[in-house]
Amino acid sequence: MAVLKPLVLAYLASTCVAASPQQVPFNLEGNGRNLDPNSFKYVARRNGPQIFNALHSSMRQFGSSLKHNGMSFFPAKVPVKTQLYHGTHTKERVTGMEWLAFEIEHAEMFARSRGGGPPGKRPGGPGGHPGGRPGEEPGEKPERPENPGRGSPGDPGAGRPPMDGQGAGYLHTYQTNRDLLNLLYIDGMSAGKTSMGTLDTTDFVLRNITNETAPWGDYQRAQDLCALGREWGVEGFIRMEAGFEIILCNFTDGLDFISAHQRPDNEKPEGFNNLDHFEYVRGLAARYQGITAGRVEIDYSSMVSAFFYPLNLTNPDQNKTELPRLVSADASGITRFKEDIRSSLSQSKARDHRSIDWQGVVDMLVTRYSDRLQFLASNFSTQKDMLSDINVLLNVYIDYNKTDIEAAKESCAAHYLRPIVPVSTQDWLIQEAVLTVSTEICNNLFEVRSILIEAEENGPGDVDAAKLVVKELISKLDWSTWLECGKCAYNEVCFVAIWPWGSLEDHEHPNCLKPDLITQRHGYWNMDR
């Protein structure tokens, strides 16, 4: 890492001239490998896989459902001419704070009559009464679903309100008439109303709540966020549950009202739909790897993450130790975290939201290595297969005119980072995290290469030892790609636990399911708490 030292010093010198302390929230002290354990770069290296995975899963339904306890914030914008949707009980346009969905199916679930909606008054999702919560008055604690996975939107056969006259529901379509520049994306499943950690960054960091509370009362949560937004210059908050949504603090600023279409009567043929739950999930699955069309632009260079700080992220639930929590983080650390989020928003505006595409960088690493690592670790790869794949992956870094394996390892680790020119302090921390991950990959693959070449030169070797190295690497990296279903049949969808639906099995082993099985999946989200 010594080669980075002049660059780091040059960057720090430039920021001292060009930016105020409020615009440079992080400290890049220490450029050697032996750092103070509390330094940001040390923590970024220690949490390298977590930062890497947060970048990979940002604005992606699948990875954000698996890593549902998000720990990161990103300034974001929605471009002009973007269409967004809202389900409600009235045809009149919204004038205050409300929820917007990016997908039609998401909003359709709340295009129902006031006080009606899906049975159980499901807490969550755009549309419905104030805050998009069917039957929930402002500040009121909504009912919890009687049966998670059943009293939820789109449950086939569930009793629905009449859809005629004044009891009708409406699907609104809005379109942005300018860039919505001042949005804050809260990653993970930050709209999931659970006590499992999905709300930690919202409640503990943004809302200053100091003890665990019930997850309900999302209208009050939205009001609190918009009050903070007025103070910080934020006009809305992007979150995810069963679909991505925006809490937009003022519908009269930045939106054109395109239409309000009354929904059909469920008792008539045009209103018949016994696949609504299944088709909702199909719509979600189509966005597992991103919402597409550039509808949200993330400023990765202004990312602020709990993984940047020496915070205690221990999960008190011994069954979910792999999912971080903020319940044990110290108050001063949380305060610093929040201050830096505000600073990053100012930083993003000052740069006109220009950003390095860090998700693109990690995508290049994931797409190069993900399937090949699985193949190397599998039971059906032979010693010859493994050596062939290793050569494909590593020979590009080796000059066989004068073989220098240590130099090849460094070249391998730095390969996808060479084009990067950091524009922010966070970029340096992200670079450390990504370099940590790529170094881990390259060092392990060169170790496998050594085992295989020795086996080829000296007779049959211990292929299992080589496979074990790869399996341990896969465990450390913990990429969401290794839980993907693959292509499902046309009468199936890839189903992962997404609040408020899903079982433990769906979280640990997402699978292709048919319509009749999806409605039976529940139990993961501890809805009785």
Image (cartoon, helix red, strand yellow):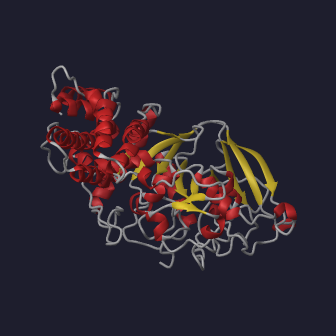
The quadrant of the image that shows the N terminus is top left
Residue in view at x 26 percent, y 54 percent: 472
Residue in view at x 27 percent, y 26 percent: 14
Q: Is residue 355 left or right of residue 245?
A: left
Q: Is residue 263 left or right of residue 346?
A: right
Which image quadrant is residue 180 in? top right
Which sits in the foreground, 292 or 482? 482
Residue in view at x 53 percent, y 65 percent: 499
Which image quadrant is residue 255 in? top right
Extreme-left residue of the structure: 34
- 312 vs 41: above or below: below
Residue 347 visible (yes or no): no
Residue 230 percent location from the top left of the image: 52, 50
Residue 245 percent location from the top left of the image: 58, 53
Which sits in the foreground, 174 or 375? 375
Which sits in the foreground, 366 or 53? 366
- 397 vs 285: above or below: above
- 205 vs 424: above or below: below
Which sits in the foreground, 489 or 100? 489
- 343 vs 225: above or below: above
Extreme-front residue of the structure: 459
Q: Is residue 124 left or right of residue 346?
A: right
Total marks placed: 0
Residue 529 percent location from the top left of the image: 47, 78
Residue 376 percent location from the top left of the image: 33, 47
Residue in view at x 50 percent, y 45 percent: 233
